[in-house]
Image: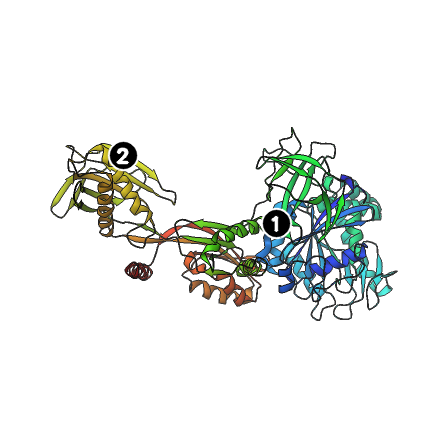
Amino acid sequence: MKVYQTNEIKNISLLGSKGSGKTTLAEAMLYECGVIKRRGTVDAKNTVSDYFPVEKEYGYSVFSTVFYAEFLNKKLNVIDCPGADDFVGNAITALNVTDTGVIVIDAQYGVEVGTQNIFRTTASLKKPVIFAMNQLDGEKADYDNVIEQMKEIFGPRVVPIQYPLSCGPGFNAMIDVLLMKKYSWGPDGGVPVIEDIPAEEMEKAQELHQALVEAAAENDETLMEKFFDQGHLTEDEMREGIRKGLVDRSIYPVFCVSALKDMGVRRMMEFLGNVVPFVEDMPAPVDTEGNEVKPDSNGPLSIFMFKTTVEPHIGEVQYFKVMSGTLTAGVDLDNITRGGKERLAQIFCVCGQIKTPVDKLCAGDIGATVKLKDVRTGNTLDEKGCEIAFDFIKYPAPKYQRAIRPVTESDAEKLAGILTRMHEEDPTWVVEQSKELKQVLLKGQGEFHLRTLKWRVENNDKLPIIFEEPKIPYRETITKAARADYRHKKQSGGAGQFGEVHLIIEPYSEDAPLPDTYRFGNQEYKMSVRDTQEIPLQWGGKLVVHNCIVGGAIDARFIPAIVKGLMDRMEQGPLTGSYARDVRVCIYDGKMHPVDSNEISFRLAARNAFSEAFRNANPKVLEPVYDVDVMVPADVMGDVMSDLQGRRAIIMGMSSENGFEKISAKVPLKEMSSYSTALSSITGGRSSFTMKFAGYELTPGDVQDKLLKEYAEKNTED
């Protein structure tokens, strides 16, 4: 295989909503480039992209697939990404290591919410966008309506390169307003017949051609002057203007294709080969120090590992992008992220599960390797003396979680290893060992996202697992001051145990003055603070302990034990066993025994005194609340609002955004447990949402009473 230089390489992401036909389009692209001799189909389960067992089981993409094509003396590296929102991490990864996004739109359903989500990602990463309107041969295809919708949502930068002469099952011809030619196909697609534009279409074609020329000229002052002087541009000048417009996102070209029938695919490939920006045309990526790293084949060697898969008979396959320098097989590199050395004995160009060994890859190219010792997704590998590191991929926060455990408890360690491997393959699968909840939490982008992992663990790794409702990390606090004392006394022959602690607790607040005087009933308690410990809590809030002991009632050496006792109850609150927070404690009196007093006695005494005072301090349970933004079509907005209100949501605002309605609300985490499933059911999968932790708020009285009752019953059973 030829060694392609940086100025001959183009990296492209294939994006779009679920069912838009990306996998079928990828097959047609590979066929047109001669990479495959026969096009596979999703139904036949023989496509290049969807080759993992779970993808064949479900019938659509779960993982992104890397493939390459040699076309017009250039190398096109393409990453075909899953369309379902649950697998958005693949698309985010792909866009970070490629330079152009081809967004596939189903001509039957137009701009779906998933399309908008991925477009927003391209905008945040400042990546060029090309639209491919697919399935123009579908029963409900409506090109004009979809173009109008696209312009309404994405703005006037949407510029058609082609338009079909008819839509629906009879689709077989289109007008190309860049080349000003008519393309038509036979029933089986393939090689088109290229003719002059018919007279009856000339006026419309010239109007769209003029709009395209103006859009191209806007991106170059020289072209603009020439356009004003001559009224037209040559084909090469238009290509140059469009390329510049793509780089600064001032133009979004629209192509027409039927991927299933291989109509229009080769023409779009020609545009990708001739017009789409090269690697070196795009802004250089930035390393962790904020320095630009240009894709220079003669520069220091640095590669970024962006993807990991585990494949049968091979094991781990690591995909990388050559960020700088020229990579050769057999080279030794330093892992800048984790430390240690790695030898890349073999490097490959990849086309799905087909791996072609190569000797060399230049800056900007994408490849894969195997049998590395200790490399993880996101690591940077450099040649000796080079200290470049990259960390530019940012993934969305999880939206769905379940507690996970093996059916057989002895398999817990095996499951932990599998989950670690799964996270490497898809970093949006997040695993957390929760000490607080005493559960292993598996977090992801939706129910199907987690169900996919479960299928793979049970079918590929043969390990039965159980998903359970995750516990909620409630917090406990108090709302008024209270006093309590407790004497721990135990005698069992020989030395006994004795410790007595008197304390007052009250809510903690920042900048509160030192405690002075408290009154409970008819008795007044005056405090004299001798020492203060302020303990920030890992789970939020603080515990502040004032030592107000006078007269040596408790020896100073027992104070640390008393604080440990208080922390015992902060870690397992008296109401529900949840973490407690924001409490101020004054230890003001107590008693000790010259022989029987010891640390454990005072620890137990403090623990029980704190529990009693806590229950008398008008305690409250706090629940985690999240900021939730939901994007919904207008026709189902009422149903979504009703569902949110049934989840104790507080609606914070509503707005319109690019043809969709946006609902902003604050919702308790308890009520978000299966929200992704419910939202998909209500809206037919046409909506999406994001959620972000907002803070802790008081639970309603009825909810708190229920939680206390459940905790009391559980402790009785135990």
Residue on which the image places disc 1: 92
- Residue at image coords 23%, 43%: 606
Left or right? Give the position of 717 relative to 435.
Answer: left
Question: What amino acid type should be assigned to the residue bearing mark 2?
Answer: Thr
- In the current view of this chain or complex, which residue is farthest to the front? 493
Which residue is nearer to you in this view: 572 or 718?
718
Q: Could you tell me if the residues under marks 1 and 2 are in contact, i.e. CB atoms within 8 Å?
A: no
Q: Earlier in the sequence, mark 1 or mark 2?
A: 1
**Residue 188 point in image, percent of width and height:** 82, 67
Frontmost residue, 222 versus 467: 467
Instruction: Determine the residue positioned at 31% across, 46% down.
Output: 570
Q: Decide: is 536 above or below 453.
A: above
The quarter in which the C terminus is drawn is: bottom left
Asked which secondary structure carries label 1, the reply is helix
Residue holding disc 2: 532
Considering depth in this image, is 297 or 516 the residue closer to the camera?
297
Is 717 drawn above or below residue 98 in the view shown?
Answer: below
Badge 1, how many Cα within 10 Å: few under 14, some, many 20+?
Answer: many
Q: Residue furthest top?
A: 385
Q: Is residue 398 visible?
A: no
Q: CA distance from mark 1 to mark 2?
A: 49 Å
